[in-house]
Amino acid sequence: MNRPAHKITPNGTPEKAFYWGKAGRKPTNPDIGMAQGAKAAPFAPARNALLELPGRLWQRLTWPAKSMIFVLALIALIYALIAIVLYSSVRNDLTGQVQTELQRLTSNLAASATDPLLLKDGGALGKLAETHNPLVERITIADRHGIIVASDNLSQLGQIQHRPLPNVTGYSGTRFYGPIVAGGHRLGAVWVDGNSRKITALVNARLDRTRNRLLILGGITALMGLLGAYLVSRAVTRPVLRLLGEIEGMEAQLRTEDQPTPTPPNIDGDELHRLDFAFKRVETRLREHLNELNQLHRRQQAMQCMATIGEMSAQVAHEIRNALSSLRGAARFLVRYGDDENRDEFLRIIEEEVKRLYDMTQGFLDFGRPYAALRVEADILSLLTRSVTRHTADLEAKSIQVSLRCVPGLHAVLDASLLEQAISNLILNAIDAVPSAGGKITLYAIADTDQYVLIGVRDNGPGIPSEKAQTIFKPYVTTKTKGSGLGLAVVTKIMMVHDGQVELRPSAKGADFVLRLPRHPLSSLPTTLNSS
C-alpha cells in the first residue's frame, strides 16, 4: 500500500511523496493520469481526421474512377482466388509427376539389379548406383542380408543396412524403395533418395512460369476490364451530366433579376452527389417561387375581394337609389296632390319598389349566408319534377312549354334542398329569358360515366352574349334590366359545396346551363361554404 509522506521543499512548502508498497505497483497519484490524458488529447482530432480521410478521398472521385477501381478490385479478387487454386493444383500435379518418375526409376533399378546381384557383379551394380538424374541424390543397393553392395558413396559399401527390406515398391517422403525379386525370392532392395533441393527448384521454376502467365493474362484482363468499366461508366454518366446541366440551367432561369448570381459551389462528390445537390438547389428555388406565387395569389385575392366589394357597393347603392327615387317621387305626388284618381297607381309603384328592395336584400342574404350540404341519396327525376312544380304559376302565366327528359332510376348523393334552389334559379332565369309567345324550357339529366351526373336547363331565349359568357357567374353580373345578378353566383356556391361545377354550354339558340356534380361525395363530412 502506498503511504503518502510530506517533506519540506527548499521554499518551505510541503511536497507530497509516495512510497512503493509492493514491487511492480504503480503509484496512485491522480495527477499522473491527468497528465497522460492531457498529452493524448491533442492526438484525437488528428486520429479522427486520418480515419475519415479514405471516405473523403472516395467521395471526391468521379463515377468513372469509382467504377474502374471497383472493377479492378473485383478482377484482383477473382484472380487472387484463381491463382491460389491453380497454384496449389499445379504444385500438387508437379510433385505427383516427380514422385511417379522417381518411383518408376526405382522399379527399373530393381529389375536391372537382379542379374548382377545373382552373379555378384560389383561393377554392374556400381554402374547402376551412379546417379545421372539431377533429381536423385543417392542410390543404394543391398543384398538380402541387408549388406550394401552398391552405392555412390563408397564408404557405405559392405555396411549393414539396418532398415528392413521392403516387400513392395513405395516411398516415404523423398526416399523411394523397391525389392529386388527373382523367381519369387527376394534378393535384396534398392533405395533411391530424391534431391529435395532440386525437386523444389524444379517445381518452383514451373510454378514461376505459370505465375508469369497468370500475371500477363490478369494484366490484359484488368486493362480490358478498366476500359470496359470506363466506357460503361461514361455511357451511364453522360445522361446524368446532361441532366445536371439542364437542372443547373433551370436553376439559372428560376433565379430572379434581384438575386445575385451564386458562385459555383465546391462540391466534394461524384456526378450523383452533384446531381443531388442540383436537385436540392432547384427545389429550394421552386419553394421560393411558390412562396412568392402564394403571396401574389393572396394579394390578388384581396384585390379581387376589394373589387367585388366595390362592385357590390356600387350595385347596391344604384339599386337602392333607383328604388328610393321612385318611392320619393310617388310619395311627393301623393302628398302634393292626394287626389283619388292616381292614388292607386302611385301606391302600386310604391309597393313594387318596396318588393324589389325586399327581393334584392333577400338575394344578398341568400348569397352571403353559409351553405352546409347534408347529402343523402336522392332520385334525380323526382328532384326535377318538384323543381318544375314550384314554378307552375310562372310557367302558365307566360304559356311556356316545359319538357322533362330524365332516365328513371338515376340517383345521386346530394342535398336536395340546395340543389332544388339551384335548379329553381336556373328556371327563373329561363322564364325571364324566353319570349312571351312560344317559350320553351327543357330540363334534362344524364349520367356522365359512373362518377358524375349532368343536370341541364335549356331555353329558347336570346342566349348569353359572348362578351359576358366568362363573367356571367360572378356576383352582380346580369343581362336583365331588373335583377340583382346573384342568381348564378348562388348556383355556383351550391355546386361548390357539392364538389361540382356549373357551366354554360354552347347552344344554337338560347342558353344551356349544365350542373355537373359527382354521384358520390368526395368526402363523407358535410361541406360548408360561406360568402368569403
Image (tube, helix red, strand yellow):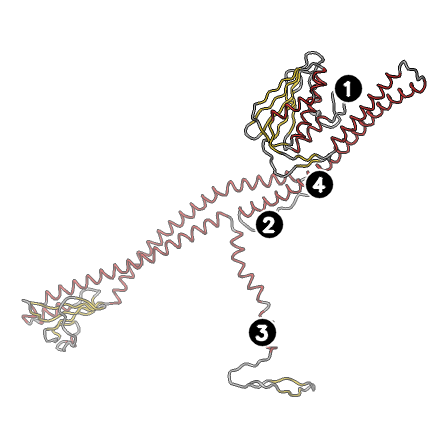
Nearer the observer: mark 1 or 3; the answer is 1
Q: CA distance from mark 1 to mark 2?
A: 70 Å
Mark 3 belongs to which amino acid? Answer: Gln
Image quadrant holding the C terminus, namely: top right
For disc 1, the marked residue is: 481
Nearer the observer: mark 4 or 1; the answer is 1
Q: Nearer the viewer, residue 368 or 190?
A: 368
In this view, 487 is above or below 403? below
In this view, 494 is above or below 437? below
- Report if the CB atoms under discs 1 and 2 are less than 8 Å apart: no
Lower sequence index among marks 3 and 4: 3
Nearer the observer: mark 1 or 2; the answer is 1
Residue lying furthest top in this view?
437
For disc 3, the marked residue is: 36
Nearer the observer: mark 3 or 2; the answer is 3
Image quadrant holding the N terminus, namely: bottom right
Nearer the observer: mark 4 or 2; the answer is 4
Quadrant hosting residue 76: bottom left
Q: Nearer the viewer, residue 459 or 157?
A: 459
